[in-house]
Image (cartoon, rainbow, N blue to C red):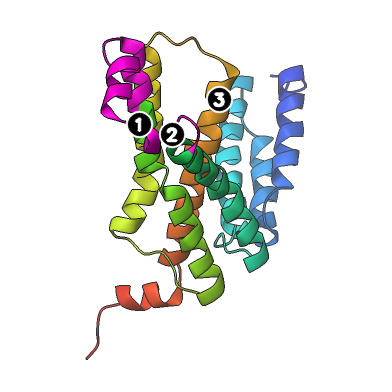
């Protein structure tokens, strides 16, 4: 059976490319892979063999790369914390103390403008959710500064749980309120979920990771030998 087919030539070419991805200590194994491929009968079997080699190559390369611990310099972390929590902080200040903020609501205003319609109740739910959960914006800035200035990491507990669960809860409330009031999808939705849900959540998870990987956290997780 002739092995000089277009499929076989493409398979061999891809295998050579993949072999180049292997770490140096596994280059001998890569050469053996190419040698064995020459003896695989059938284009389909050759493709299956190549798929297995792709999987092995990716795993070996990922192990060799040692992608790091997600630790960054204090300057970079300060920029990250600003990006993650400053927009939520300004949003919280506006929804609480703005011209139509929660701080200026009273019973007659709520009764007149918000209660009685689905749109009004949905808007009120979003306002109170933003007022309660939005406080995680300034809180996240404080936690980030505490780590940057004093090296005090965020550990697992009620604070980390709130910083992680808060943006998710805010996104759920806003999504439910928008659907309840039949609010049409717009690009503003995407901007809201990026700035006030995804980005603060990413910042909180990074702080929690830094706390988990800190020396004092690792020391506390080790069993006592005393």
Horizontal and vertical percent position of residue 104: 39, 35
Of label 3 and label 2, which has the lower sequence position? 2
Horizontal and vertical percent position of residue 173: 35, 28
The reply to whether discs 3 and 2 touch (Cβ–Cβ < 8 Å) is no
The residue lying toward the viewer, choosing from 59 and 198, is 198
Horizontal and vertical percent position of residue 48: 56, 28
Within 10 Å of disc 2 (Cα), the crowding (few <14, some 14-19, many 20+) is some
Which residue corresponds to mark 2?
101
Q: Secondary structure at mark 2?
A: loop
The residue lying toward the viewer, choosing from 91 and 189, is 91
Horizontal and vertical percent position of residue 186: 56, 15
Quarter occupied by residue 170:
top left
The residue segment tinted magenta is 98-125
Q: Secondary structure at mark 1?
A: loop
Mark whose residue sits in front, 1 or 3: 1
Up the image or down, 10 lies above or below 60; here it is above
The residue lying toward the viewer, choosing from 195 and 116, is 116
Which residue corresponds to mark 3?
190
Quarter occupied by residue 50:
top right
Which residue corresponds to mark 1?
105
Up the image or down, 87 lies above or below 223; here it is above
* Residue 116 in magenta stretch: yes
User: Going by the image, does 123 lie left or right of 71?
Assistant: left
């Amino acid at each position: 059976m002739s092995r000089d087919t277009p499929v076989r030539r493409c398979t061999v070419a891809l295998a050579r490319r993949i072999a180049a991805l292997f770490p140096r200590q596994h280059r001998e194994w890569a050469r053996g892979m190419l040698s064995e491929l020459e003896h695989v009968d059938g284009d389909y079997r050759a493709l299956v063999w190549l798929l297995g080699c792709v999987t092995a190559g990716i795993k070996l390369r990922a192990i060799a790369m040692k992608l790091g611990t997600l630790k960054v310099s204090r300057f970079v972390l300060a920029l990250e914390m600003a990006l993650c929590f400053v927009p939520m902080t300004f949003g919280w200040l506006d929804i609480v103390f703005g011209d139509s903020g929660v701080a200026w609501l009273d019973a007659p205003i709520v009764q007149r403008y918000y209660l009685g319609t689905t749109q009004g109740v949905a808007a009120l739910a979003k306002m109170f959710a933003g007022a309660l959960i939005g406080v995680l914006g300034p809180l996240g800035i404080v936690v980030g500064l505490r780590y940057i200035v004093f090296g005090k990491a965020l550990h697992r507990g009620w604070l980390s749980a709130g910083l992680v669960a808060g943006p998710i809860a805010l996104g759920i409330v806003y999504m439910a309120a928008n659907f309840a009031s039949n609010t049409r999808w717009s690009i503003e939705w995407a901007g809201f979920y990026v700035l006030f849900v995804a980005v603060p959540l990413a910042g909180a998870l990074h702080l929690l990771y830094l706390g988990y990987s800190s020396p004092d956290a690792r020391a506390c997780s080790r069993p006592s030998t005393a």
